Amino acid sequence: MWFSKRLPVAAPHSPRRRPYRPAVGSLEARLVPTMTFHGGSVIPHVKVQALYLGSDWSSSARLYQQTGQLEGFCQYVVHSRYMTMLGSMGYGVGRGSWSQGAIDPLVIDKGYYLEDSAIQGRIQDAISAGDLRSPDASRLYVVFVEGGVSLIDGAGDSSDGAQGDSGGYFGYHNQFDGGDAYGRGVAIHYAVVTYPGAGNPYDRHLHGAQRVVGTMTSTASHEIAEAATDPDGDGWFDARGNEVGDVADDDALLGGYVVQALVNKRERECVPPGARWLSHEYFGAAPYDSPFSGDARDHRHGQPAPFDHTVSDAVFAAGPGLAMK
Ligand SMILES: [Zn+2]
């Protein structure tokens, strides 16, 4: 093996989640949605390492093969235009780096929700055992949970939508006060990605061979972008608490991998140059195979469309793919 040793029915469509933050809104901000910086931190060059949580990742040939695809994705995306697009948008984030991941062959009882506190504990154990790179301000662990496991986050919301009021979710990012490999206190940043299917949502835009791994890479791209631009909840988000991946959920193909579109500061949906849209529902106007490929400009055929807060408010109220928390 190339790894180190340590290795319910879902809603058809659900937002990726971010940690709960009370909304701080102003009337003006509600009328003109914009991503704003809240004076805290970003991760300019994120250092991504995956942790595959659950014994199925090593015991199932199918899942083990998928770890290879997910490793390829993580290595690709941190060096890709997906990250430099965030710089073009003015978020102060660029290319990152990648380290080989690890499997944690935890036997998970799929009859229960896997709680966020348990995930934090496994991350800390893997760090303390030297199975993950030591954490620092730039490190981001991306935890892929094996199939058939529904999560419950710190706010009591479950990924299958049965608990709490989120309606279900694909993943989230978070941080906790932990320790590095030497026992020194450090904030540990991580993202969690659910396995689509039993007990978790699928990405409704994806079909066929893209459906399982594509849902996971789309979610991972969303969470990596958000963890880089808002690692501690005091970075980039709008007056509704939406981070850069939360406003729209369309997908695109970049380098052979499914990634999720992000929004610029004016909350226009963008994908990097060279990406191909796989879905295009946000604002409902562009064709499925729109030739436009972002470059951090407005997604409507690359034109700097005048902002229409009426349209945007309607999308906020009823549009697809909105994380409302
Ligand atoms: Zn999000």
Image (cartoon, rainbow, N blue to C red):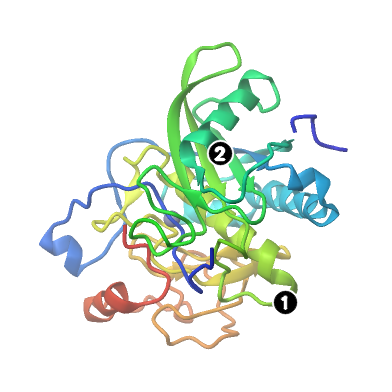
Q: Is residue 43 visible?
A: no
- Residue shown at the point (54%, 54%) measured from the top left: 150
Q: Quadrant of residue 205?
A: bottom right
Name the residue at the front extreme.
111
Left or right? Give the position of 1 relative to 277: right
Identify the residue at image location x=51%, y=74%: 12
Q: Secondary structure at mark 1?
A: helix
Label of residue 46 in the image? 2
Tell me where residue 38 appears, x and y as whole percent.
Answer: 27, 43
Q: Which residue is mark 1?
A: 208
Residues packed near mark 1 inside 10 Å, few (<14), some (14 to 19) or many (20 plus): few
Q: Could you tell me residue 237's position as x and y percent?
A: 32, 52
Mark 2 Cα within 10 Å, few/some/many (few <14, many 20+)? many
Q: Report the mark closest to the observer, 2 or 1.
A: 1
Q: Position of residue 281 (x, y in %)?
A: 46, 81
- In this view, 12 is above or below 150: below
Based on the displayed image, in which of its 4 quarters is residue 323 positioned?
bottom left
Position in image of residue 134 (x %, y %): 61, 23
Which quadrant of the render holds ligand 1?
A: bottom left
Image quarter of the C terminus: bottom left
Give the residue type that dot 2 points to. Answer: Val
The first of marks 2 and 1 along the sequence is: 2
For residue 37, side relative to residue 45 (left or right): left
Please indicate whether residue 26 sits to the left or right of residue 59 in the image: left
User: Is the Cβ of the residue at disc 2 closer than 8 Å to that at disc 1?
Assistant: no
Q: Which residue is farthest right? A: 1
- Kindly identify the residue that appears in the image at 73 percent across and 37 percent down: 105
User: Looking at the picture, does residue 153 appear above or below residue 202?
Assistant: above
Q: Would you say residue 211 is visible in this rendering?
A: yes
State the quadrant of the N terminus: top right
Q: CA distance from mark 2 to mark 1?
A: 31 Å
Q: Amino acid at mark 1?
A: Gly
